[in-house]
Image: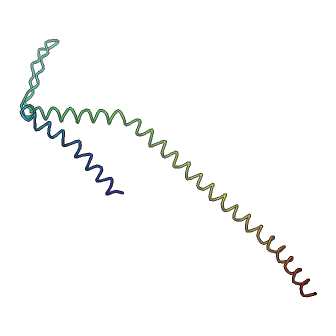
C-alpha cells in the first residue's frame, strides 16, 4: 500500500509542479526582475525607507510561506480539539473492549458450568438405555 500511496503522491506532484514550472519558465523575465519596496510615512515622523532589491520570485515565495504559516496557526486549535476527541474515543474503545472480554469470559464460564450438568444427565440416560439393552 505504501508504494501505491507514494506513486500517487509522485503523480500528484508531477501534475501540479509541471504547469507551475512551465508558467514560471514562460514568465522568467518577470520572476527574475528585481524590485524594491518603499515605505514613506509623513506623520508623526518623516520616514522614507526602501528595501534592498529582491527578485519577484522571492516575494512570491515569501507570500506563499507566510500564507501557509497563517493558515497553520489558525488551524491549530481545531487540530488540538480533534486530537483530544480522538484520545477520548480511543479510551472509550479500550474500555468497551474490556467489557466485551469480561462478557465473553462470563459467558464461557456459564457454558462450562452448564455443560457438566447436561453431560451428567446424558450419561445417566445412556447408562439406563444400556442397562435396559443388557437386561433384554
Above or below — where is 107 with respect to 45? below
> Does 68 sit left or right of 83 as displayed?
left
> Which residue is situated farthest in the top direction here?
43
> Does 67 sit left or right of 105 as displayed?
left
Q: In the picture, which quadrant includes the N terminus?
A: bottom left
Q: Position of residue 6 (x, y in %)?
A: 30, 53
Between 83 and 117, the residue placed more toward the observer is: 117
Between 116 and 45, the residue placed more toward the observer is: 116
User: In the rendered image, which quarter is residue 78 located in?
Assistant: top left
> Does 28 sit left or right of 132 as displayed?
left
Q: Position of residue 69 (x, y in %)?
A: 28, 35
Number of marks present in the image shown: 0
By what rule are the colours in the image chosen?
rainbow
Q: In the picture, which quadrant includes the C terminus?
A: bottom right
- Residue located at (52% from left, 45% from top): 88
User: In the rendered image, which quarter is residue 73 located in?
Assistant: top left
Above or below — where is 34 with respect to 47? below
Above or below — where is 90 with respect to 80? below
- Residue located at (71% from left, 65% from top): 109
Q: Position of residue 94 (x, y in %)?
A: 55, 53
> Which residue is situated farthest in the right direction here?
136
- Residue located at (18% from left, 36% from top): 61
Amino acid at each position: 500500500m505504501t508504494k501505491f500511496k507514494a506513486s500517487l503522491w509522485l503523480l500528484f506532484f508531477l501534475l501540479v509542479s509541471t504547469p507551475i514550472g512551465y508558467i514560471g519558465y514562460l514568465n522568467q523575465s518577470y520572476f527574475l526582475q528585481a524590485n524594491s519596496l518603499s515605505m514613506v510615512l509623513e506623520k508623526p515622523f518623516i520616514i522614507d525607507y526602501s528595501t534592498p532589491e529582491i527578485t519577484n520570485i522571492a516575494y512570491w515565495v515569501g507570500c506563499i510561506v507566510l500564507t501557509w504559516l497563517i493558515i497553520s496557526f489558525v488551524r491549530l486549535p481545531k487540530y488540538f480539539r480533534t486530537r483530544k476527541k480522538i484520545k477520548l474515543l480511543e479510551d472509550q474503545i479500550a474500555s468497551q473492549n474490556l467489557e466485551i472480554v469480561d462478557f465473553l469470559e462470563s459467558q464461557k464460564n456459564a457454558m462450562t458450568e452448564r455443560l457438566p450438568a447436561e453431560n451428567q444427565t446424558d450419561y445417566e440416560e445412556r447408562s439406563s438405555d444400556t442397562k435396559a439393552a443388557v437386561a433384554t
